[in-house]
Image (cartoon, grey):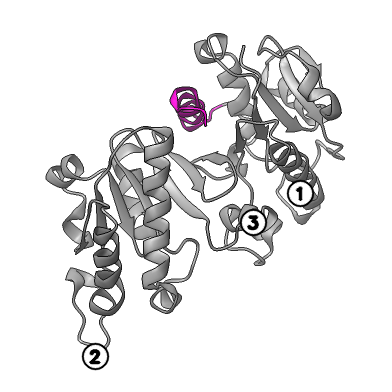
Amino acid sequence: MKFNPILVVSGEPYSIFLELFFKVYSSKLIKTYNRPLILVASKKLILNQMKILGYKFNINLINQNMLNKKILDNQKINLIDVNFNYKNKNNKISFKSKKYINTCFDLALKLMKNKIGFALINGPISKKHFLKKKFLGITEYLAHKTNTKNNEVMLIYNDKISVSPITTHLPLKEVNKKIKTGMIVKKIKIINSFYKKYLNKKIKFAVCGLNPHCETVNKFSEEDKIIKPAIKILKRNKINVEGPLSADTLFMKKNIKKYDVFIGMYHDQVLAPIKALFGFNSINITLGLPFIRISPDHGPNNSMFGKNKSNPKSLIESLSFLKKIRAN
């Protein structure tokens, strides 16, 4: 088996992620998977969740300093154990998990920096409790941790279409102040390079306008002053792009066949349509980091914690995607 493992940070300890991980580990996908998975999480938490949910897997405890000398497979759960004071009496998300989550990320990022991992997958976290308004989301948190701030790009990927918002977890009233011509150009170039490098694919972009029908009664038009200049620059760089296009008709069937990637000016402009169209059959990829980072496209869902009723589709899609892309 190829060594370059996929590192999996379990994220919020009181989320549904370990349940989903166990379901994936029970699936046919893992039996034929071409890379070892290494889970970065608490052994105590894993054993407790296996007991509650009715799963039984052997655990292969790994010393992170010996990783480059070990031959791994997925017969057992490969685990880097991170201490966590798990208390079964209180299964609610709180600020007390922050140190544990941060330690998990730090260990995984250290391994990625040392070229141990092929890619990083992380389970969901609570932005309110973990990020405490310091970062807009995990995308920005990881950009800060890897010294790639302002290069990060959120790409919600699906085999049929993908979407990317120019601004991420930002209040609507702030969007028009944040979008810039240079930002649009940079992010679309990063997405274009990703498709070319890892998927060997030439793609066509559709860029949404900001205002309804790409029109405004204000003197300043974001479409005319910001978005159209960006599209001109991109076309000069031989990138296949059209816009600005009105968001209200952009996701019609004819356009889904015509375009590969839809660029929105704000989060829900493009994430709401793709989730309505494809549900859990999408994954969240962070581009612009020194490595590929993927997160299943759902939140912690604490209300379903320990109930064994959650759908692992997005995690399966994440691993399936990493299985097919070209290593570089």
Magenta stretch, main secondary structure class: helix
Q: Secondary structure at mark 3?
A: helix
The residue that appears at 71% across and 12% down in the rendered structure is 76
Q: Which residue is mark 3?
A: 141
**Figure check: 102 above or below 57:** below
Q: What distance separates the C-alpha of mark 3 from that of mark 2?
A: 36 Å
Q: Nearer the viewer, residue 48 or 32?
A: 32
Q: What distance separates the C-alpha of mark 1 from that of mark 3?
A: 10 Å
Q: Position of residue 209 (x, y in %)?
A: 25, 67
Kindly identify which numbered label has been placed on residue 102: 1
Residue 223 can be seen, yes or no: yes
Q: Is residue 22 magenta?
A: no
Contact, CB < 8 Å: mark 1 with mark 3? Answer: no
Residue kind at label 2, given as amino acid type: Lys
Residue kind at label 1, given as amino acid type: Asn
Q: Is residue 314 magenta?
A: yes
Q: Earlier in the sequence, mark 3 or mark 2?
A: 3
Q: Is residue 94 left or right of residue 239?
A: right
Q: What distance separates the C-alpha of mark 2 from that of mark 1?
A: 46 Å
Q: Secondary structure at mark 1?
A: helix
Q: Which residue is mark 2?
A: 219
**Figure check: 259 above or below 245:** above
The residue that appears at 51% across and 26% down in the rendered structure is 319
Q: Is residue 213 left or right of residue 32?
A: left
The residue that appears at 16% across and 43% down in the rendered structure is 258
Residue 47 can be seen, yes or no: no
